[in-house]
Each structure stands twice: as C-alpha cells, then as structure tokens.
Image: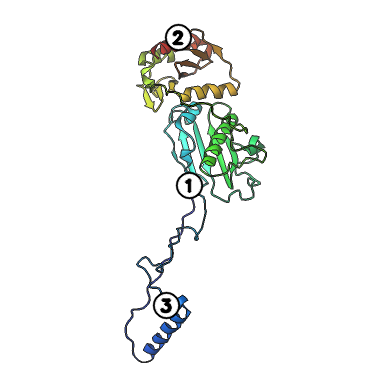
Amino acid sequence: MPGPRVGAARRTHPGPPRQLLSGLFGLTTALLVVTAAACSPGGTTQPADPGGQPAGSASQPAGGQPGDESPPPVDACTLLTADEVTPIIGAHDGGGPGDGLGESVCVWENPDTYHSVTVSIGSPGTAASGELPAESAYGETEPGPDGIRFAPGGFAEFIVDDRACEVQVVAPDDDRDVAVELIGLIRSRMSTAGTSTGLPTGFPDDSAATGQAPPASTETDPPAAPAVINPCDLVTQQEAEQLAGTPLDAPRQVEATCTFTSPPTGPTAQVEVFVGPGAKKMLDINRELGHEFRELPGVGDEAYAEDDSVYVHISGQWVSIRLVRLNDPAENRQALEDLARVVAGRL
C-alpha cells in the first residue's frame, strides 16, 4: 500500500490589509512595524512571496526539513521481471499494486491457476533495530538463510536496510527455495538503487543471492541477443490439443509465454510455452529443487525432460513446454519428447 501521506507544506497567511488606521490602532501598528524592523537582521523586513515563503529563503521539500535525506519511495513492481516470475507461476497478469502492509506491494498472479508471487517492501524504520519484529503476523516462524524467516502461508520475511519486507509465493513446488532466490534478486536491486541489502554481517559486497562477490567481467563486447520469437508460433493449436488429449481454447500470449487452456466445460488441461531466459530459469529452479531430468539426445544443442515439462536450447535460445494434465505423467512422456523435437526444428 502507498507510504505515509506526506504533509502539505505550511503556508504563511497574509497579514491584515495595510490601511491607514486612526487613533490608537494607528499608533499600535506603527510601533509593531518599528519593533519588527529592529528585530530583523540588518534592520529590514523581507516581504512574503506569492507561495507563502519568505523571499530569499529556499522552499522546504515536502515531507522533510532542509537537508532531509529520506530514501526515495520504492516501487515493488520494479524489483522482479516478468521472465523471473513466469517460471514460478506460469503466464500471469504482468504484476500490479496489491493490498497489504508496507510502503509498496506488488502482486503477480496467474489468472487460470491463481498461483501468485507477492512482494511487500516495508516503510523505512520498520526494522530500525536491524531485526525483524519479534513476532510474525502469520504465526510461528522458522529461521532461513541470510537472515530470512519463513512463516506459514508461503511467506518469507527479510530485511533490506531498515525496512521489514516479505515475499509470498503461492505455487505448486517447494516455495522456500524459490522465495530465497527472489529475495536475493530484490536485495541486489535495492542495493543498486542505493539501499543496503540488510544481509547479516560477514557477507562480501551486495551479492545477496549467493553471499559471494561477483566475478570480474572478462567480456569486452556483449554477445548478440537471440532473435525475438513469438511463443505461439512454436506450437500449433492441433499439437497442443494432441498433447493435452482434449480440445483447448485459442492460445493467449503474455510477453514470452503462450498458454492453451481447456474450456470450463472440459477436463482440466493446459499447455504452456515459454521462450527466452524464463525457460532457462525454470530449468535452473527445478534442478535446485531436486527434480529428476533425463537428456534428450539429438534435440537442439541440448534438451532435457521431466515428468511434465521439456526444455530445449538451440542457437542461444531456450524454450520450455509445460503440460498440466490430471493423468499419469508417464503417459505424456513420448508426446512431450516428440513435440520438443518439432519445436527444435522450428527454431
């Protein structure tokens, strides 16, 4: 939710009309003017400008005193990219402001499965002591790596500088390892923006994801980026329906993801095609989670398969295909591998 409302700058109300008064009031006014002049530096008064500030004095910035160095507001939606969230929850809405405690909250949600990732960045001072609040709002907690604290409901609480923050991952896989990786990305980006990572002491620099200093770059020229590919061009409607074993709605593309979903009246089924870094990220995350993979020889430069997904790498481009189907995964094995070969040929 937005941060605390900044108070409006104080305005100076104009004095009474400068009219010539008579009698006692005129004498009183004259004495007041003389007294003000005597108390003013240099014996002169400074007229008010139209904005209500004395002429020759700088306007104070809203929300602080002169020299105030309060950190700028944080937009939680800028701390993760779509490609980083897509491998975790699939096709999503692109992220947007959400409800909850904190200076900024952002939610990425898959509208079909309701899996989601939520990032909440607390206001400055919510972890002023360098520690999370003694009690979590979500119940009993368990300690995690890098000062992270896990709470029920897929929550992971952590500190960035003097801010108490949290990530919630609602996904079918083990949420904790994914949350730790996301927190590493968030800390790194907030550090780049001028905010401390909040890591416990003893970690070199701000490499929050690994706790190790990044190696010095040896590249002189960055490699050329792979060509942009429309994920919906890689799998046809017929191929998706054959893999799912049921009719599917027309594909829906969101950035580098193409999703075929079964209609509400049909059996549950979904085919998702990912192109680019998100496909490789999904493979890396599932490897860290201990998923079992088998190599697919002769498919692209390299290719791997697991129960519900295949991953293909060719000419610097990664593509993955994930199947959601309520049957024995072994029944889908050959169809997934065959489609991986078809997609590799199209690349």
Q: Residue flagged by tag 2: what amino acid is it?
A: Asp
**Residue that numbered label 3 is attached to:** 44
Element assignment for label 3: loop
On the image, numbered disc 2 is attached to which residue?
338
Q: Is residue 130 visible?
A: yes
Hey, what amino acid is under mark 1? Met
Q: Position of residue 105 (x, y in %)?
A: 49, 42
- Residue at numbered disc 1: 1
Cα separation between marks 1 and 2: 47 Å
| Among numbered discs 1 and 3, the one appearing first in the sequence | 1
Residue at the spot 47% in from the left edge and 25% down from the top edge: 278
Q: Is residue 23 above or below residue 67?
A: below
The Cα–Cα distance between marks 2 and 3, rounded to whole angstroms, is 89 Å
Q: Residue furthest front?
A: 220
The local crowd at label 2, few if under 14, some if 14 to 19, many if 20 or more residues have their Cα within 10 Å, is: few
Q: Position of residue 2 (x, y in %)?
A: 47, 48
| Amino acid on which the number 3 mark rests in the picture | Thr
The C terminus lies in which quarter of the figure? top left
